[in-house]
Image: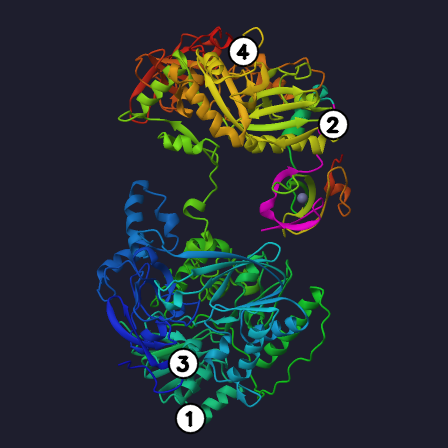
Amino acid sequence: MQPNRLDQGGLIDRGRPLQFTFNGTAYLGYQGDTLASALLANGVKLVARSFKYGRPRGIVGFGAEEPNAIIQLGRGGETVPNLRATQVELYDGLEACSVSGWPSLDLDLTSLFGLVGRLLPPGFYYKTFMWPRRFWMAYEHFIRKAAGLGKAPDTADPDIYDKLHQHCDVLVVGGGVAGIQAARAAANAGARVIILDEQTQLGGMLLASHSEVNGMPALDWVAGQISELQGHARVTVLTRTTAFGYFDHNFVAAVERRTDHLGLSATSASRQRLHRIRARQVILASGAIERPLVFANNDLPGVMLASAVQAYLNRWAVAPGRRLLLVTNNDSAYQAALDWQTAGREVVAVLDTRPGSNGSLPKAAEAANIKVYRGYGLVEAKGGKAVAGARIASLSADGQSITGAIQELECDLIASSGGWSPVVHLSSHTGNKPRWDDEKGAFVPGNSLQNFLAVGASNGEWNLKACISQGYLAGQAAARAGGFDSVDLESPVVNIKETIESAQQAVFLLPHEMPTSRAPKQFVDQQLDVTAAAIELAAREGYQSIEHTKRYTALGFGTDQGKLGNINGMAILANALGKSIADTGTTVFRPAYTPTTFGAIAGRDVGELLDPERYTAMHRWHERHGAKWENVGQWKRPWYYPQAGETMLEAVNRECLAVRNSAGMLDASTLGKIDIQGPDAAEFITRIYSNSFLKLEPGRCRYGLMLKEDGMIFDDGVTACLGDNHYLMFTTTGGAAAVLSWLELWAQTEWPELQVYFTSVTDHWATTTVSGPKARQVLERLGTDIDLTPAEFKFMDWRAGTVAGLAARVFRISFTGELTYEINVPAHFGRYIWEAVYAAGKEFDITPYGTEAMHVLRAEKGFIICGQDTDGSMTPDDMNMGWAVNRNKAFSFIGKRSLERSDTTKGNRKQLVGLRTQDAATVLPEGAQIVNSLNETIPMRMQGHVTSSYFSPILGHSIALAVVKAGLSRMGDTVYCPLADGQTVAAKIVPSVFYDPSGERQNV
Amino acid sequence: MLQIYCPYCREMREEEEFSYSGEAHIKRPDNPEALSDEEWGDYLFFRKNPRGLHCEMWQHTVACRRYFNVVRDTVSYEIHETYPIGSQPSKMTDAALGSTD
Ligand SMILES: [Zn+2]
């Protein structure tokens, strides 16, 4: 039983009934229904409680403009919040509920609403949240509950979403009559065309009207053209597809809903597709949205747009009431009254704010014996939870004041029309400022900043015949602009009954006998409960700019972006300020046009595919040996290798001690490696690094600091001379890509005369580091033709040779302070050499160690890690590394001049020091702030912070590196670290090298 | 998202292939040591921030790895031209271009 369903008509299939539930109650609808049309067919009027005041709300519109019927669809992982019931296609088994946070729609919470109303005056956010601050938590809790913003899924979305990258000559947004003509014209001229529309099928407003073209229903007339488009080789037709954002250089993002109309679990392929469309030309044919008139209690369920009443009647065969009262300032709305009467329902009256009209439709209404009150306004809607009647009165000729006595009429449905607003959202996304057109009574797209044309109703053209020719001409023009010689097909010959249309009246807020501030609420933005009184109050409080008023009142801030309310709000503000609408201007619409799912935007870039992971050649070995992972950039590096029952600290201590006492092995393959060649390679490297490489001989390595031009350390590493004009530069793991771009920048833009070439070889080589006092014996056991005697293969040497039967480069460089060999082999042999080292080291109990042990070992030695101990504000002197700077080089290397700036030479810069905690077992947290005295008043003067901090198993106490103001001259001072938990740790400033300060162990 | 013509690859490519690299036509002083702190600070830190045409460098990071110059309108984001390092734009006025190399 669907009490409001008509017996015939509509684009629905009465042979296919569908069951659904709304807020737990079961209903029946038909194939072809939207959730909104099915609810109205079932006589459901109350669909939401309003945001601020908790007032009952009903369905107002029939498309993207709907402010009230915002629903949550389904449950679990596939649930979708914030959908408009007017755009949800009905399917069997659909479950929906209101997103409103109130316990129940029917529960009367009047007393509580009164309280809320007082809590939420206009400008509430600014007036109330500022003070007292301690109330904020209570407000937030309350508002979130009241706002009803929908629920996020509580499990991962099981569905698949796709992205398509599309290119076309002409993109047509909107498949109404203008868009269809544009697509035909462009395709016929030879252009590749995409036409898309958010509705189930093309046709636009024709789907909801009874227009005639060439003596047949207009929908039948375009049906042939639609199938022509669908069969056209150069045309892609996308329905159920919303262009939600129009970005730079004619890039349009559109989401296609492929299976949502079949049910949330009906997915066999992808549920939605994101089309990323790059178009040479864009034609915006996105139509227009009817504006409601604003009057007292205009939010009662049963107050709708005239166009919505017409659409529900004609498209879905639903009459959402019995007795219609229509109020309008224009001709077009009369069609709703005529259609209502044709459907066999009673039209109580039409109230026309204009003193008169010569238009064809008003005449037709009077000929049909519909009672028309000329020069009348609707003062106030009457009713409890739904419309029961209206108070009306005669108006002055300008429609701005009441001139006669109030009369009352009974009705259960009020339709209103204040004219039409072109959908200028997409053109606004491009930075285009809409222009107010007085004659059309609408904002239309302004001067174009990108290659688009707006046509039809989206350009303020309301006449069907004009829309047809405008669309066709735009399609031809776009094709021509895209380089296609139009074959100049004639505009289609159409025969449409000529009609006369009288101008609409510039009336937005209908007058009440009481001033706006005292009258019953006159809603402008129903989703956020913004009233005419609130806008007038903002004007009285000094707000002049529409952008400020928008933020002050929250006008247009809802998920509907004020599609219905914005223009009325601007007009009311303009009136209050005594300005014109053109001078008041409009706010900026931003993407997305309608809410878009995260699923569509993320596409397949989720889970494992969110970000690439980089593995070394030895990855599977680490995995098999129980490595825990540390993410370093995209690399997965072994963090530590716990043995059964070991804690992280126990594992790291074991790994550290193995390196100090015998031998450890580390996968160092992830370090950045840049092969540098060319006759000017040494000169180039010397300009880039703080020290000189001009005299570095083949077979030798040198450590260097890389500075930015401001003198701050940016990266560091060892560079080896491989041969004449041939070098290998090691970078930090995380800095490899940035360093390569940095080298290329200088080589290409500043010193193109230098002959030097760079190749990233990070992935080409696998590096096994053997470190510890037994390292030499491990290499001997491994088998190599390289002479390992200390005199022949010294610290900071490298040698090429055969290791374990493989051609290898071995570098004697050390990040642990122990005797170390870094064995580099082509990456394909990485796993082989790693396992060979592991086997050869067995008798020395060689121990694989991860990045954590590496960090502890290097911190014991006071070796810095760029990006951990430095932060882009540290010079070499700050790091106590002046030894790595050669100030006598002929060329003023990058960053050198900045080392002499007054700021970099001042005395109290933060400097790298060591910290010893008073309690040897206490490990300071990294990032802990340092102060001089606990007796200082708060806020204390910060002296620096802890950059690295560990427990050193070889030393038996904690160690920390820190940067402290003038720290190098404060050895022995005690400083304090106040921690977040309220405790304070006292520590003594000590040199930053804790272990083997003379460096003997690496030099054996 | 911008679409940028790489003057080396000679194709329009998507912005995600490129990296922005700051204002173009800033020449490193020949003799930094001869400059005062203030002059050096101008070179280091001060950049144009025009409302309108802006010469800037981009790198075609995931393709040819070449740096090149772009004239972009900071209001409309329209790209007027792209041209190799070491050459001058054809459409910029000297005033908009400032010091050149
Ligand atoms: Zn390129």
Badge 4 crowding class, 10 Å Cα cut-off, few under 14, some 14 to 19, many 20 or more, is: some
Q: Can you tell which mark lies on residue A326?
A: 3
A694 sits left or right of A719 in the view: right
Q: Are marks 3 and 4 on the same chain?
A: yes
Q: Can you tell which mark lies on residue A390?
A: none
A345 sits left or right of A602 in the view: left
* Residue at horizontal 57 percent and vertical 28 percent from the top: A673
Residue B20: say if magenta.
yes
* Residue at horizontal 65 percent and vertical 36 percent from the top: B47
Protein chain holding label 2? A
> Any atom of ligand 1 within 8 Å of the CB at mark 4?
no
Q: Mark 1 = which residue?
A: A369
Please say if A82 is above or below A31.
Answer: above
Protein chain holding label 4? A
Can you give x and y, in whole percent of width and height, for residue A742 in the image?
Answer: 62, 31
**Could you tell me which quadrant the N terminus of chain A lies in?**
bottom left
Can you give x and y, in whole percent of width and height, for residue B11 in the image?
Answer: 68, 50
Q: Are marks 1 and 3 on the same chain?
A: yes
The three-letter amino acid code for the residue at tag 3 is: Leu
Please say if A141 is above or below A167.
Answer: above
Q: Nearer the viewer, mark 4 or mark 2?
A: 4
Residue A282 sits in which quadrant? Answer: bottom right
Residue A435 sits in which quadrant? Answer: bottom right
Label 1 SS: loop
Q: Mark 2 = which residue?
A: A754
The three-letter amino acid code for the residue at tag 1 is: Asn
* Residue at horizontal 47 percent and vertical 22 percent from the top: A869
Residue A40 sits in which quadrant? Answer: bottom left
**Of callouts 3 and 4, the N-terminal one:** 3
Q: Which residues are magenta?
A: B1-30
